[in-house]
Amino acid sequence: MSYKSDLFICVGNAKHFLRWEVPELQKYFNIVDSPSPKTILLSFGPDVLDIASKLPALKRFAVTFPGFSQNPLRDMHTRERHNDILKNFDAVFINPGPLETAYSELNNIELYPFSVDMNLVTLKRYRNKLTSLLHVSGVAPQKDWERSESIMKLTGLKYEVYPPRNEDFYSAEIKRNEFKNKLRRKLGIIEKKYLPHGYVTHEKVVKKYQSYDGFVHIANDVKHIEHIDGKYTASLIEAGVTGSILFWHDTYKLGNGLETVFDLSVEPEKAAKEILEISKNIDIKKHSKLTREEMIDTFNVQNSIGIRAKSIIEKLG
């Protein structure tokens, strides 16, 4: 590409999701530090939609996803506000999932696959047995994490919910990160930007994925007015990249688009039996390998950004 158009990215609290996408975006665009009437604007995240809609732009695009205490699926006021803002964008990129329903009245919606940082989520081993289970999520209503915990317990297998459901754990994590940055300042080293409260470093979470055989995220649709999940969780996808055997429930009844993910019942007793039955009837190592391959093929950043970049470039005329 001989000439790259200037692109300004308006981002707020979603910087940790944007981090691994920027290098790929730079292959298509010249990333600039400020908006202008001659610059493409890309709004990134549901928390900056209103701000981005008021900035000057040559063309206006949005990437948005569930979260950040905004639920256009259940909260009709939020849906009306989002629709009113998003109709003014040249294109709005969303993942397949509940936002398709929330924004069904808009005619500028385009689907793109979610992306994960494949460089960070590495393969340590293919699983050859299923003797342990893991659930990873934040402490939020839509995660329905107690259900996953009860299912894992009912299987009789070794299991863990991570991070621990303990506020002291998060407080200790924050203090530890602050101490590390204090040492960096004393040594004249650039401080590290850590994830916000409620998150754990990806390095630690990835080690958890790698140390368990299966990943369980079975959530009922809690119909919460504020909180919403995506069709699949980032944790489930990342666990799959490490070769974990994935167990999931089709919360929004939108269909399971992933061949290697096992869609289970929402009832704990039934789901636990399904996990044990599945583990007896599949080639674990073969399925572990196929799971990793499907996650990489579907959620790699090159494909995800390529779809969006091509659409933006076509609309520049």
Image (cartoon, grey):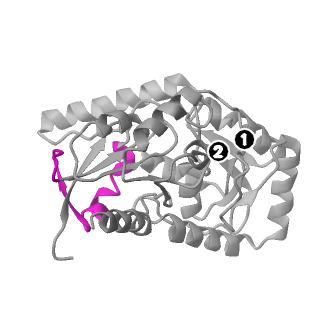
Q: Give residue 104's position: percent from left, percent from top.
A: 58, 47
Q: Amino acid at mark 1?
A: Ser
Q: Amino acid at mark 2?
A: His
* Classed neighbour count for the residue bearing mark 2: other residues with Cα under 10 Å, few (<14), some (14–19), many (≥20): many
Q: Is residue 238 magenta?
A: no
Q: Is residue 122 above or below residue 72?
A: below
Magenta range is: 15-38
State which tag comes first along the sequence, 1 or 2: 2
- Residue 163 seen anywhere in this rendered image of the structure: yes
Q: Is residue 16 magenta?
A: yes
* Classed neighbour count for the residue bearing mark 1: other residues with Cα under 10 Å, few (<14), some (14–19), many (≥20): many
Give the secondary structure at mark 2. strand
- Residue 210 seen anywhere in this rendered image of the structure: no
Q: Residue at x 46, y 57 (%)?
A: 116
Give the secondary structure at mark 1. helix
Q: Residue at x 65, y 64 (%)?
A: 258
Left or right position of 137 against 120? right
Q: Residue at x 27, y 64 (%)?
A: 316
State if disc 2 and disc 1 touch (CB < 8 Å): yes
Residue that numbered label 2 is attached to: 135
* Structural distance between the alpha carbons of marks 1 and 2: 7 Å
Residue that numbered label 1 is attached to: 148
Q: Give residue 61's position: percent from left, percent from top.
A: 35, 51
Q: Nearer the viewer, residue 276 or 211?
A: 276
Q: Give residue 22's position: percent from left, percent from top.
A: 29, 57
Q: Nearer the viewer, residue 211 or 64?
A: 64
